[in-house]
Image (tube, rainbow, N blue to C red):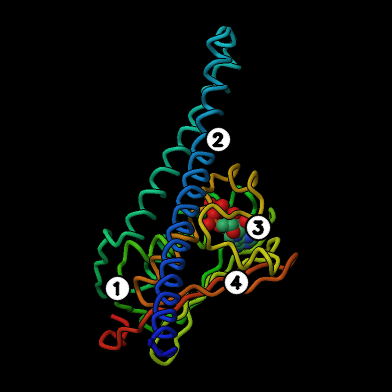
Amino acid sequence: RLSISPLKKINKTINLYAQSKNKEIETLQKNAAFRREFIADISHELKTPIFAAQGYIHTLLDGAVEDKSVRLKFLKRAAKSLNALDKLVQDLLTLNQMESGVIKFHFESFDLKEVIHEVIEELEHKAAKRDMIIRFFYDKDKSYHTIADKDKIFRVCQNLISNAIKYNNDGGEVEVFLKMLKNNIMVEVKDNGKGISPDDLKRIFERFYRVEKSRSREKGGTGLGLAIVKHILEGHKSKISVSSTLGKGSVFSFELPLDKDKKKVA
Ligand code: ADP
């Protein structure tokens, strides 16, 4: 007769097998749900500027084209929507390429303060339009050389500084700091704008997450900027940190390694 213990063993093996299969099914279901949600999100985001552009063009075709001032206004709005659509598609492609590891990083030694100066120069007129000044603080006697992907770090700084302007109040302040640490350089972007609540703070790095959808869209935001920033910094084995107080403002910061061979200012 069969003793009880081999039967128990068989039962246990069957149970373990069933458990592992259930887990596999659960993972597959989760992946499928994630994909469905992602496609729904993208479709919704794409539809918004397409519908807007279609609306303006159809109104023009229905007769508004006869009125010169309306014609110009509507064409400008349609062009703005199409630009937003273009930016969205570009950002989606970048994020997708980053997530699938297709994008390569090109590391070189460069001075972070020069990159930040370039970014500020590019964004200064946007800030000035809303009576804001961008202040940049660093030690003139120090070299801020790092080894990183210059273009991608440009993009990180561009995104953080442009958000500090976008989500600030008119007349607000944007301050950028370069701080020398023992082995790293810290970049800090500070604003005295509306700030972010603790619940939103947990989610702002998710793709398409925006605290106020309409304000972000109106300012030309895609909701993908910080997700891209996070990926770029991960590619540098670094990460983005943020602290924020509602009504007071936010500070975004990240660190990159100091290139110690280029310690002296040239
Ligand atoms: P967007 O294209 O909407 O700017 P981001 O991914 O760059 O997308 O940012 C996500 C959201 O985080 C923004 O929509 C905004 O609500 C919030 N956010 C980002 N930076 C700031 C900031 N400096 N101050 C307040 N809110 C911010």
What residue sits right under mark 2 in the picture? Answer: 48
What residue sits right under mark 3 in the picture? Answer: 168
Q: Quadrant of ligand 1?
A: bottom right
- Locate residue 220, reporting x and y percent: 54, 44
At 64% from the left and 46% from the top, the residue drawn is 215
The residue mark sitting in front, 4 or 2, is 2
Residue 251's disc is 4
Asked which secondary structure carries label 2, the reply is helix
Question: Looking at this rendering, what residue extends furthest in the front direction?
Answer: 1
Residue 110's disc is 1
For the residues labelled 2 and 3, say whether their Cβ atoms are less than 8 Å apart. no
Cα distance in 3D space between marks 1 and 3 = 30 Å
**Of pointers 1 and 2, the one earlier in the residue sequence:** 2
Q: In this view, does 86 lie above or below 79?
A: below
Asked which secondary structure carries label 3, the reply is loop
Check disc 2: other Cα within 10 Å, few if <14, some if 14-19, many if 20+: some
**Of pointers 3 and 4, the one earlier in the residue sequence:** 3
* Three-letter code, disc 2: Thr
